[in-house]
Amino acid sequence: MLPIVAVQVAPADSVDAAPTLEEQLLHACSAGLARARCVPARGLGGEVPHGIAIVSWAGAEHVSIEVGLADGGAPTWISRALDFAESDPQPERWRAVGFTIALLADDPRFWPEAEPVELAPVPAASPALQTREPAFSAELRALMGTGLISGPWRWGAELRLAVPVANPLFLTGSVDYSLAGSSSLDVRWFDATFGVGLLASSILARLDARVRLELLAENVAVRVERGGAVDRQNAWIPGVSLGGDLLYPLGDDWQASARADAFWLDGSTGISSGDQRIGAAAGAGVLLGLGAGRRF
């Protein structure tokens, strides 16, 4: 059986030391060790650990780690300190601590009779957090906003993609489908947008924000039913949209997503039946959305 490294965690009062977080630390530590496995220091019984690791949190964003030889001879200690950003997910912080313990515990001074092991460098901050730059994100949101002039709002859904180009610049595009109507009038909107934006990370406690400027192409399709006759019309209208998104992480890959946009079209779209004008689709207004997305 592999030798053990006993890990003692001393969290500060402001740190949530949930058992699942400590388990993630131990799992990452064991996965990173080439010659041993990591176990909690409590409940060792009569088993003598080959090494011991002491994890001391100073608040939720700073931790110091000391690893020393514990099975005879003069103790040799190696230490490392990690600092995290407010936006770093807590599970990633604890996994980063586990990988750092593994790096320190594999020091050749702790294993004088073992074959040398080539170790991959671990950065001073969380490796998962430093390398998890998403290639792009996709979001699906419920949609509501300006529909008919002096009429009901439209309701529908939006699919949006965002692709980073060079921080903080990104390309983005979306498709929207929404509906509004009354007893004799049904209106359908299909919008397609494409443009650029800027990303601002961690504007407030892990909350990210995006600002977008996009070209807009809108198709308005109308169905009018009067006196048993049905009349259908549709038209494409160009425009522009200025909007923003708020993004809040829900785990490693998922995020809650909200949007607010102001749009301007090349005029309103009149709706008529025969010679009578019965309404118009708005040529400017606002669109709001709420949903979730995934980072890839």
Image (cartoon, helix red, strand yellow):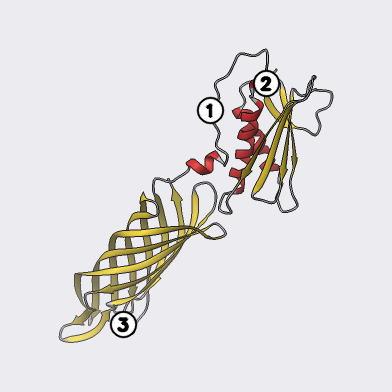
Disc 2 residue crowd, few under 14, some 14–19, many 20+, Cα 10 Å? few
- Report the residue at 37% width, 61% height from top: 158
Q: Quadrant of residue 270?
A: bottom left
Q: Residues within 10 Å of mark 3 (few under 14, many from 20)?
A: some
Q: Amino acid at mark 2?
A: Arg
**Seen from this angle, which residue lies furthest bottom?**
276
Name the element at disc 3: loop
Closer to the eye: label 2 or 1 = 2
Choose between 280 and 63: the one closer to the eye: 63
Quarter of the image with the C terminus in it: top left
x, y percent for residue 294? 45, 50
Residue 41 in the figure: left or right of residue 148 = right
Q: Position of residue 242 (x, y in %)?
A: 34, 68
Who's the residue at 60% across and 29% down the image? 31
Determine which of the numbered discs, if any, sits on residue 109 in the image: 2
In this rendering, is residue 245 above or below 9?
below
Q: Is residue 240 left or right of residue 55?
A: left
Indicate whether 84 appears above or below 290.
Answer: above
Which numbered disc, 3 or 1, marks the residue closer to the eye? 1
Q: Residue at x 57, y 39 (%)?
A: 124
What is the number of the mark on residue 120? Answer: 1
Q: Whole-Å distance between the Cαs marked 3 and 1?
A: 63 Å
Binning the other alpha carbons within 10 Å of mark 1 as few (below 14), some (14 to 19) or many (20 upward) gives few
Q: Which residue is mark 3?
A: 149
Q: How many marks?
A: 3
What amino acid is found at the position of numbered circle 3 in the picture? Ile
The Cα atoms of the two marked residues, 3 and 2, are separated by: 77 Å
